[in-house]
Image: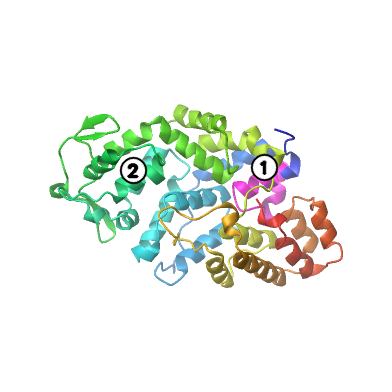
Amino acid sequence: MGSTLSGDAAVGHLLRRAGFGPAEADADTYRGLGYRKAVRRLLDELDAPPPTDPPAFDAYEPGAIQQIWLDRMVGGHAPLAEKLALFWHGHFATSNAKIQEPFLMWRQYQLFRTFGGGRFRPLVEKVSRDVAMIRWLDGNANRKGQPNENYGRELQELFTLGIGHYTETDIREIARAFTGWGSRHHGFVFTDGFHDHGEKTVHGKTGDFDGDDVVRIVTDLPQCKRFIAGKLLRFFSHENPTEPEVDELAEVLVRTDGDIRAALFVLFLSPAFLAAERHRALVKGPVDFLVGGLRTVGASNTPLWVHGGLERMGQILFRPPSVKGWPSGTAWLTSAAVVERVKAARRLADAHPEAADRILDLAFDNVTPGTLAERLAAAEGKEKIALALASPEYQLA
């Protein structure tokens, strides 16, 4: 591994990966702290409760839950908490396209926002009781004698272990353990008459297990720690972590009983995270790109045009395309999506043409890349901002 990021470059890298990029209101503060203290400050913000909903907030108003979450990403004071909620939203991907209950989707977001930085097992326990998740994976159809295997499969394949680390028998037995777990209206209910009290064998352990027992069994497996470590590394650090890097972060999760905050502390301070080759090496998803752009130009909330832009780029909050969540990397950069990014860059620039140099400093950590600096040399005002935000360099975090 070559050189290491330092100074403003390191702090800017951290703010893009652990948030949505620096905003003028806080960039100087984080830079003044130095890198290690900036990491601690971001992590300390995980202790703060989510903001209270506005008095007039109505989750059923079209677009309301997307608007308020985007506003929190753009203007909020806990960027890591919101970025981590976005991570869990993609990990436990649930879509209102099927649920058709925005209130339930909003409550699931609040679950991620409140508990996302804690220990992994309690988070999975809460997700297993979450009414949106129950409806999404057909928990209400899971009854003794007719177990529905959807949650039993995805709990292992997508949420805790990964493909190849469970058997069809594990799926069936876990489905039996979750029989009787369902919902009524907006609340979780357990119906004992629908529950299979017989013995189940799950990953080599046998007993009259219920859903909580199953969550304990699968999250105790070493593979669970490795699976979550790998996902954290790919989301926050780099797309292809090595086996030793995964093992090292997994060991932190083993040592701390699955503490996500402790794992992120180690991840953000690791040489791999701060290696120069990691700088601007992840493609920003549409939410990352537009929220980061709004923060860069000094917006305090989300213009309505952003919703259409996100839809055309392929990422609507609370509507991931499948239980596997959203794509990543260059999959975000289709020709149509790139055109939308260029249009969005121009709209961002049109709204804030007066501070081009300050915006460039925020976007590129006070050092505009040489090739981009050459392209911007003849531009001024909003044209300069639009070119910068539409540049290949700005599409990368």
Residue identified by numbered label 1: 278
Q: Is residue 389 magenta?
A: no
Amino acid on which the number 1 mark rests in the picture: Arg
Count of numbered circles in the view: 2
Please provide the residue range marked out in magenta: 10-32
**Does residue 73 lie above or below 304 as drawn?**
above
Going 22% across and 36% down the picture, which residue do you hit?
Answer: 209
Residue identified by numbered label 2: 125
Left or right side of 242 for 193: left
Q: Secondary structure at mark 2?
A: helix
User: Residue at the left extreme?
Assistant: 193
Going 58% across and 36% down the picture, which residue do you hit?
Answer: 267
Left or right side of 308 for 164: left
Which quadrant, please, contains the N terminus?
top right
Residue 176 x/y as whole percent: 21, 43
Mark 1 vs 2, N-terminal side: 2
Classify 10 Å Cα crowding around label 1: few (below 14), some (14-19), many (20 and above): some
Classify 10 Å Cα crowding around label 2: few (below 14), some (14-19), many (20 and above): some
- Residue 4 got which mark? none
Q: Main secondary structure of the magenta part?
A: helix
Does residue 101 show up? no
Going 61% across and 47% down the picture, which residue do you hit?
Answer: 17
Q: Is residue 16 magenta?
A: yes
